[in-house]
């Protein structure tokens, strides 16, 4: 007999029994929930494996211990599952969303995305959330009965965090909430904030490891300074990586506990008892005002001192040149592309989208190799 996968969920959680299903109907699994199946399909996808060699902040070749899109996604999933369990939400759904949220990200992080968006400005633009959806809906080729991974509506909804009205109008049911100004499931809201918790705190770790940030600089951030002082009080004489690790994990714990407490209060005050009521309510997953202010202070600090550091900017400049030059040479000469990405007609916008698919699917090191093959006279 199939287990009752919904037995321990709160009334406001996403449930298999109320799922809007898949685009192509499939026979249900006898051993796994539909959201488990989504998670498993994501983990086995080609796009997921490529995340191992895609930049988070530091390009992959700059060091073996820096986060990549893959390790970041795993860390997001871990935080999200912990949050979901405490809120009695659907852990399998929130894990699937977390693991899939960056599948459409370009090589070289946000620098690559910004460059590709600029290249695509006359062809509909480029946004990595939409590209992640395109990956799971169309680009993955693993099944005989359909393109993509044929994920459930709820997982696809969670992947699509942002969307312009013009794009929403082309997405049918999936885009309706952006037009009607409704909310996604609590699981989708939670995965979004788990992403924020993960990258803010782990970028501190990577920034300190790289030497681009110092502990003295970090003491300007109230959240870090508070837990750094606590670590020094509890462990006199501690230093180095152990002190940083102890501090960062306490910061994560503080953010997680605040989010759980605040979200439970928001859910209670809203009186929601179903997913449909969640969609009609204001956002319910969030931090307290005090914690939100501290998290924003941390984000501003990282933007100024890490993401805009001159050494990061140097790699950002290189990344933009690589992506832009690759796009230009491919759009001018589609015959240089692998055959799967060439169109036989003269549909320039569609060919441009194919070029964007090809570039977005590259890892950092593949993009650099492709650039050398195309532009270096001593490469073949």
Image: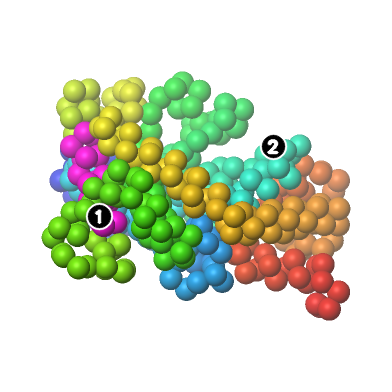
Determine the secondary structure under disc 2. Answer: loop
Can residue 80 be seen from the camera position used here?
A: no
User: Toward which corner of the image does residue 126 lie, by quadrant?
Assistant: top right
| Residue bearing the label numbered 2 | 124
Task: Identify the residue at image location x=38%, y=60%.
Answer: 205
Q: Main secondary structure of the magenta part?
A: helix
| Residue bearing the label numbered 1 | 228
- Residue 279 lies in magenta, yes or no? no
Question: From which residue to which does the magenta span run?
Answer: 247-263
Label 2: how many Cα within 10 Å (few below 14, some 14–19, many 20+)? some
Determine the secondary structure under disc 1. Answer: helix
Task: Identify the residue at image location x=68%, y=55%.
Answer: 317
Between 183 and 367, the one lying in front of the other is: 367
Can residue 336 be seen from the camera position used here?
A: yes
Task: Identify the residue at image location x=29%, y=56%.
Answer: 248
Label 1: how many Cα within 10 Å (few below 14, some 14–19, many 20+)? many
Give the image location of residue 309, x and y in percent: 55, 53
Task: Identify the residue at image location x=56%, y=42%.
Answer: 130
Give whichever of discs 2 and 1 has the lower sequence position: 2
Looking at this view, name the residue that lies furthest to the left.
234
């Amino acid at each position: 007999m199939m287990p009752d996968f919904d037995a321990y969920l709160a009334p406001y959680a996403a449930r298999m029994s109320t799922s809007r299903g898949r685009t192509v109907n499939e026979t249900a699994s006898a051993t796994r929930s539909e959201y488990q199946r989504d998670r498993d399909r994501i983990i086995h996808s080609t796009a997921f494996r490529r995340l191992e060699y895609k930049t988070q902040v530091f390009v992959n070749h700059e060091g073996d211990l820096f986060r990549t899109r893959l390790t970041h996604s795993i860390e997001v999933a871990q935080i999200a599952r912990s949050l979901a369990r405490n809120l009695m939400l659907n852990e399998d759904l929130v894990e699937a969303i977390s693991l899939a949220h960056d599948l459409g990200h370009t090589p070289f992080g946000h620098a690559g995305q910004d460059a590709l968006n600029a290249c695509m400005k006359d062809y509909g633009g480029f946004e990595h959330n939409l590209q992640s959806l395109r990956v799971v809906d169309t680009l993955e080729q693993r099944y005989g009965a359909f393109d993509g991974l044929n994920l459930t509506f709820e997982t696809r909804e969670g992947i699509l965090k942002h969307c312009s009205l013009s794009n929403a109008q082309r997405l049918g049911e999936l885009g309706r909430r952006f037009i009607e100004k409704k909310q996604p499931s609590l699981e989708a809201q939670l995965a979004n904030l788990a992403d924020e918790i993960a990258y803010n705190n782990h970028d501190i770790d990577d920034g300190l490891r790289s030497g681009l940030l110092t502990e003295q600089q970090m003491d300007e951030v109230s959240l870090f300074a508070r837990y750094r002082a606590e670590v020094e009080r509890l462990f006199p004489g501690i230093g180095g990586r152990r002190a940083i690790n102890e501090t960062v994990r306490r910061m994560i714990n503080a953010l997680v506990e605040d989010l759980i407490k605040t979200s439970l209060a928001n859910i209670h005050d809203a009186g929601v008892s179903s997913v449909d009521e969640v969609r009609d309510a204001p956002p319910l997953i969030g931090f307290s005002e005090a914690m939100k202010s501290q998290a924003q202070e941390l984000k501003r600090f990282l933007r100024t001192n890490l993401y805009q550091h001159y050494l990061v900017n140097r790699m950002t400049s290189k990344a933009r040149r690589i992506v832009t030059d690759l796009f230009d040479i491919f759009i001018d000469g589609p015959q240089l592309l692998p055959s799967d990405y060439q169109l036989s007609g003269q549909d320039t916008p569609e060919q441009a989208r194919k070029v964007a698919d090809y570039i977005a699917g590259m890892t950092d090191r593949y993009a650099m190799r492709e650039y050398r093959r195309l532009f270096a006279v001593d490469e073949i």
